[in-house]
Amino acid sequence: MEHVQSQSVAFCTLGCKANQLESSAIADEFRRHGWEIRPFQEKASLYVINTCTVTGGSDSESRRMIRKAKRNNPDARIAVTGCYVQVASGEVAGIEGVNYVIGNNFKQDIYQIVQSVPVSEDPYVLVSEIDKSRVMAGATTSAINRTRASLKIQDGCDYKCTYCIIWVARGASRSIPMQTLKAQLQDLVETGHHEMVLTGINIGQYEDPETKGDLTALLQSLIEIPGPFRLRLSSLDPAEVTPQLLSLMAETDKICPYLHLSAQSAEDYVLKRMARRHRAEDLYRLCDQIQQKLPGAAIGADIITGFPGETQARFESTYQVLSDLPMSYFHTFTYSKREGTPAAEFPDQVPEPEKHERTRRLIALSEAKNLAFRQGFLGKTVNIIVEESQDKGMSEHLIHVGLDRTDLPQNTLIPVKITHVESKTTLGQVCV
């Protein structure tokens, strides 16, 4: 019989990068206190499930992983946190085997909670009204690996898109003070990290609580830190990519020439129904501005297919706009109802087969555009950070490059000439 260490914990994290960062930070806390971190599929004495609730399917997957944890070790304690807990704590508490139900405001305290609160017949529930919170909760930094780390700068969202319940689960937008972030970035640089990903729920809403400085002001402050590092921005609302931000990115090599836009659609009727703040014309204009300021920049986008009211003609319009735009990839999501959102009640829902066919077409378009984007770097030199395997790395444009050498130490920042591009592969020659 497999031995289970008395203080072992396994994590399952669903959903966004913010959740991934928070789980990593929680794991760091357990590790500092001598706990063994085990893979989720193995036996552990405690399971932590950090849930997502962006769709009804996300809720179902969260419940499935709770049941899986119980099967992995029927004697284990189970702690559930995240956005599903925040919007449906009673439902989560009713799932057999759950011992702790912890809201988003308290997820950073999970170690202390499981240490101090004994298991009882009824689950321990700690959930507050996050929509009234104006204080950042949780740890803000965590190493992804030895080369990259995340720096959480913001949480929550002030927008109420009709398909989304995250503004309920995460609360209003709130930000970490600029000076705190600068000190945290300094620590990451000094411990040898070469790339930091700035994350949050809507980082374009960053506002320093002390100076009221925006995202551009924060970046200007962060790049003043000395050392060989680069910053990568996570997803941005197209309406919040300002000329000032693009100008700053053009002036420094410490911010990756990479922008991921939460576009969601490129057809005006659908965008209006989603309660988005941009239109197709804005995407054309923004991509043109990006190309002018940052030639060769990587531009990605999130796109939802099959939103209620997206007729075939409206989908074809989105497809044409995305074909025209100089984007290097899309993250495509098939619309799924999320109970509690206005869109779930819209009458003109799209049949499932049509939604999935549209998703398939956009994935194929994304793959073709990504191949063309990478081919544009043939013969050019990019800056690679060598990853753990030592025979590959990632460029500032988010291109994964296989290297012609395997003797380079992990975390080395080196120039690499792109020599070969195929549908799934990019190869490069080390220039040192």
Image (tube, rainbow, N blue to C red):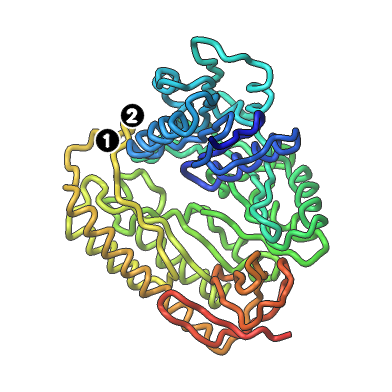
Q: Residue at x 69, y 42 (%)?
A: 208
State the mark number for residue 56: none
Secondary structure under the numbered disc 2 in the rendered image? loop
- Which x, y percent locates residue 355? 22, 53
State the mark number for residue 340: 2
Secondary structure under the numbered disc 1 in the rendered image? helix
Q: Look at label 1 and name its amino acid.
A: Ala
Looking at the image, residue 408 sits to the left or right of residue 317; the answer is right
Q: Residues within 10 Å of mark 2 (few under 14, many from 20)?
A: some
Q: Residue at x 43, y 81 (%)?
A: 422
Residue 102 position (above or below residue 41): above
Q: Which residue is mark 1?
A: 344
Q: Look at label 2 and name its amino acid.
A: Gly
Residue 40 position (above or below residue 408): above
The quarter of the rendered structure image containing the C terminus is bottom right
Looking at the image, residue 182 sits to the left or right of residue 290; the answer is right
